[in-house]
């Protein structure tokens, strides 16, 4: 797992490293050692404090292990690549430093940074991605010109950069602003996602702001590398995360997604189908709502430029009205081209002239 570590205390969705060892030991037939687990987890952050906090969080799981060296690094995310070597202390000889290549990962999990548009090095990043994507990503081609939308948020560039770190069928999960669902620059991002991933889940909360000190409305997205015709589940959480995931264990997260994946199973009595909208399901305790949207509909939305935020309601929220819609022109009203006189005399006239014209005094100036 590659984790671009930010503030883990904000959202339990991206916080399970602290529980991964305990859960692994209890859920495997053959227990996996603490050192084996650490060797599977990598983290990166450009800032010192969150990187140090992550080292402490992983280290404290087994403080008596002398080979306890979490693989947390501090670098610019856009400056590192798979196979690049990183200096890691040897797990047996503490005087020895090993050069360990960064592998590709089964999962990338992150709270990508939110940076104001003026501070994003667009030209530098555009040049970098042109060298990586020019021949493989049609989402960035405007005719024959390679161009990433300059209004894209910084975290969107992080998605682009994460692709190369993932194995085939690997998972990318991140918390982001919800702006790309409806903004114009989001069209390019959506095409990139649909070209490279199955969009498995997009999650929002009706119960709380996940960032309590920010006015940014956030969503959580889970992607699987590789194309697929499977639908996307737009999930609305109606309870606070501290209520929904009281124990913050890996098992609780797995149970959450198991329920979501089986929401449309007729044998699952925990869910009811919506009475009005097709392929919308509500958990019986009203804690979760799931709207299932076909991949073909997401592809069509690129041309129609639909706001994906509406899909939390339904794939076609206006569908119930379609049979009752009529074209008001010309059955209700008709119109032709507007007429144009070119110039009309201004109604500044004498009383004498108005005797024959008989224009009401309200509409003219008499002298």
Image (cartoon, helix red, strand yellow):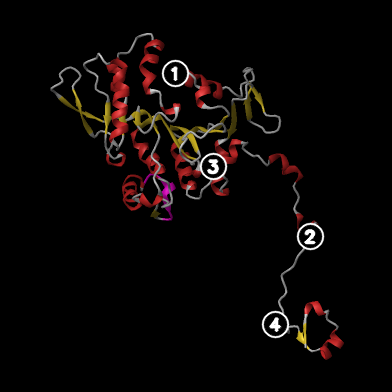
The dot on residue 249 is: 1
Q: Judging from the image, what secondary structure is the residue with disc 4 in?
A: loop
Q: Which residues are magenta?
A: 135-143
The residue at which mark 3 appears reads as 299
Q: Residues within 10 Å of mark 1 (few under 14, many from 20)?
A: some
Q: Which residue corresponds to the image point at 51% horizontal and 39% vertical from the top-left?
A: 217
Cβ–Cβ under 8 Å for marks 2 and 3 = no
Residue 239 x, y percent position in the rendering: 56, 27
Cβ–Cβ under 8 Å for marks 1 and 3 = no
Q: Is residue 91 left or right of residue 288?
A: left
Q: Residues within 10 Å of mark 3 (few under 14, many from 20)?
A: some
Residue 354 x, y percent position in the rendering: 83, 86
Q: Quadrant of the C terminus?
A: bottom right
Between disc 2 and disc 3, the foreground one is 2
* Picture quadrant where residue 264 is located: top right
Q: Answer above or below: position of 162 versus 125.
A: above
Q: Judging from the image, what secondary structure is the residue with disc 1 in?
A: loop
Q: Quadrant of the N terminus?
A: top left
Task: Work out whether residue 160 or residue 73 is closer to the camera in this orientation and state it.
Answer: 73
Q: Residues within 10 Å of mark 2 (few under 14, many from 20)?
A: few
The residue at which mark 2 appears reads as 333
Task: Work out whether residue 224 or residue 357 is closer to the camera in this orientation and state it.
Answer: 357
Q: CA distance from mark 2 to mark 3?
A: 36 Å
Q: CA distance from mark 2 to mark 4?
A: 28 Å
């Amino acid at each position: 797992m590659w984790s671009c570590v930010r503030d883990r205390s904000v959202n339990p969705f991206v916080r399970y490293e602290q529980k991964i060892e305990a859960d692994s030991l209890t859920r495997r037939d053959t227990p996996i050692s603490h050192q084996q687990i650490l060797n599977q987890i990598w983290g990166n952050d450009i800032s010192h404090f969150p990187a140090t906090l992550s080292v402490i969080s992983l280290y404290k799981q087994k403080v008596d292990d002398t080979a306890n060296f979490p693989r947390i690094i501090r670098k610019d995310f856009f400056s590192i690549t798979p196979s690049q070597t990183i200096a890691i202390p040897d797990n047996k000889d503490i005087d020895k430093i090993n050069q360990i290549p960064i592998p590709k990962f089964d999962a990338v999990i992150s709270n990508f940074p939110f940076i104001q548009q003026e501070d994003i090095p667009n030209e530098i990043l555009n040049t970098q991605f042109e060298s990586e994507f020019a021949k493989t990503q049609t989402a960035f081609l405007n005719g024959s010109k390679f161009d990433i939308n300059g209004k894209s948020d910084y975290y969107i560039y992080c998605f682009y950069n994460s692709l190369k770190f993932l194995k085939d069928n690997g998972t990318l999960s991140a918390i982001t602003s919800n702006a790309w669902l409806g903004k114009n620059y989001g069209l390019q991002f959506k095409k990139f996602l649909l070209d490279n991933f199955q969009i498995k889940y997009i999650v929002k909360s009706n119960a709380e702001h996940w960032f309590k000190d920010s006015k940014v409305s956030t969503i959580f997205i889970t992607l699987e590398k590789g194309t697929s015709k499977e639908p996307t589940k737009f999930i609305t959480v109606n309870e606070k995360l501290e209520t929904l995931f009281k124990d913050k264990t890996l098992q609780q997260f797995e149970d959450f997604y198991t329920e979501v994946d089986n929401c449309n199973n007729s044998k699952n009595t925990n869910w009811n189908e919506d009475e009005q909208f097709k392929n919308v399901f509500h958990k019986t305790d009203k804690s979760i709502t799931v709207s299932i949207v076909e991949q073909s509909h997401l592809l069509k939305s690129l041309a129609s430029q639909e706001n994906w935020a509406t899909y939390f309601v339904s794939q076609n929220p206006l569908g119930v009205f379609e049979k009752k819609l009529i074209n008001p022109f010309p059955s209700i009203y008709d119109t032709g081209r507007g007429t144009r006189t070119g110039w009309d005399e201004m109604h500044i006239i004498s009383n004498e002239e108005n005797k024959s014209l008989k224009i009401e005094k309200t509409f003219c100036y008499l002298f």
